[in-house]
Amino acid sequence: MSSLSGRGTLLSQAIFHSLAGISMEPFAGLDYYRLDELYSDEERLIRETVRTFVDAEVLPIIEAHHRQGTFPLHLIPRLGELGLLGANLRGYGCAGVSEVAYGLIMQELERGDSGLRSFASVQGALAMYPIYAFGTEAQQKDWLPRLARGEKVGCFGLTEPDHGSDPAGMVTKAVRRGDGYVLNGSKLWITNGTIADVAVVWARTEEGIRGFLVEKGTPGFSAREIHGKFSLRASITSELIFQDCRIPSASLLPGSEQGLRAALMCLDQARYGIAWGAVGAAAACYDAALKYAKARVQFDRPIAGFQLVQQKLVRMLTEITKAQLLCHRLGQLKEAGQARHTQISLAKMNNVENAREIARLAREILGAAGIVDEYPVIRHMLNLETLYTYEGTHEIHTLILGRDITGLSAFA
Ligand SMILES: Cc1cc2nc3c(=O)[nH]c(=O)nc-3n(C[C@H](O)[C@H](O)[C@H](O)COP(=O)(O)OP(=O)(O)OC[C@H]3O[C@@H](n4cnc5c(N)ncnc54)[C@H](O)[C@@H]3O)c2cc1C
């Protein structure tokens, strides 16, 4: 992975940060079941490179961005430079790393912040992947290298104001007119929407649901940022509006003829990254809680010495370890092209639910300090509310699995 060649410089830097008066050692990793022994040298190296990048360039600035509700735009070319955008895709300037390495990248980015991992997920799994899997060669050559370098930004518009968990009911339409289509409708809650140079937009056509590439600046296409979020604050979330927006036939993703199934295939790629990313957020919370518990003295002893605190720490460790094992096996299956979408659902559902609980336990251990952003815990706790809902809510994944094991659909 030649684009990771800058790692020597980064790795040589000593990274420390101090939080709320208690000196925090750099994250040493959490590997209770010695999973490191199962990763290849390259996978470990990639993980360390991203870990170092996050420690050096993300953690020192992320609380300020979270507080201000801004995304650290200057990191986009850095993500490209490090080969972290669409990293599991092959060719077109993509790094072509293994699925496990890709998962480890997502894990480390989300240890920094869910907004950062969401950026990389949307860029790689929801903008680059559909072009890679369903686009023409011309579309691939045009967009993928620039998206991989972080020169251009992509977004994915599936959700609509009245159709979230039920995207099959979408009302956004693309009607054939002359040598192209006219797009009308809107998409809501779209990550990267206002900064995207290209939007992968799913719309109803006479032939069924199809994916289109809509470029920024196309007349009739506008985007507005959604403000007032208390979760994923260091991420841009937008509404996309299409009013008689004329797009050429060449903007159709021809491989999206499978309709909604094609969109769901993209979501599977992203959900895989979320399953790994949730482990990173949980590990950050566990790490902060353990260090805090050892340093915080009450009743003349560190609170880590109390049974009730230990019970919480042990629960956190146990769930993180189980989630890591789930991710690793899922990564192996995905690498072999054998990961079923229901297995991805199970990992997303389980790992996010447990990360959400772990963040709450960590917040409890920090007491009052758990509600201020001098520690990363409350930020992760709030971010995990979004993970619980997006890319298929927890309930929808439960129904997907329920249908799989019973053969009976309980959706409607
Ligand atoms: C920060 C953020 C970023 C996002 N980024 C993107 C993006 O980039 N692109 C994109 O297309 N979308 C994006 N989304 C949208 C996200 O995927 C949707 O929010 C999600 O699919 C849920 O849709 P909804 O919010 O409309 O909830 P609804 O579908 O209205 O659901 C509300 C509640 O009802 C429950 N529910 C719904 N149907 C059933 C059922 N049959 N049985 C039981 N319970 C049910 C749900 O589980 C949920 O608890 C993003 C969302 C957020 C918050």
Image (tube, rainbow, N blue to C red):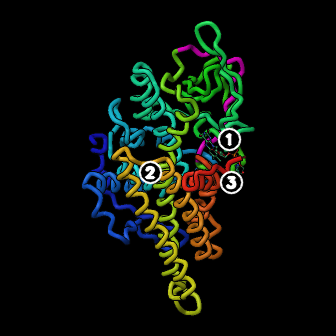
Residue 179 left/right relative to 10: right
Q: Is mark 1 within 8 Å of ligand 1?
A: yes
Which residue is rendered at x = 31% and y = 40% of the image? 3
Pointer 3 or 2: first along the chain: 2
The residue wearing badge 2 is 106
Residue 242 left/right relative to 398: right
Residue 77 left/right relative to 239: left
For the record, the magenta segment spans: 235-249
The residue wearing badge 1 is 166
Q: Residue 359 appears at what percent x and percent y?
A: 57, 66
Q: Please, what is the three-letter code of the amino acid marked with disc 2?
A: Met
Pointer 3 or 1: first along the chain: 1
The residue wearing badge 3 is 230
Vertical side of 32 occupied by 103: above or below: above
Q: Quadrant of the N terminus?
A: top left
Main SS category, magenta section: strand
Q: Is residue 357 magenta?
A: no
Q: Mark 3 against mark 1, which lies toward the viewer?
A: 1
Vertical side of 322 occupied by 98: above or below: above
Residue 218 left/right relative to 288: right
Which residue is rendered at x = 30% and y = 56% of the image? 44
Q: Mark 3 against mark 2, which lies toward the viewer?
A: 2
Q: Is mark 2 within 8 Å of ligand 1?
A: no
The alpha-carbon separation of the residues under discs 3 and 1 comes to 24 Å
Pointer 2 or 1: first along the chain: 2
Q: Residue 294 appears at what percent x and percent y?
A: 48, 81
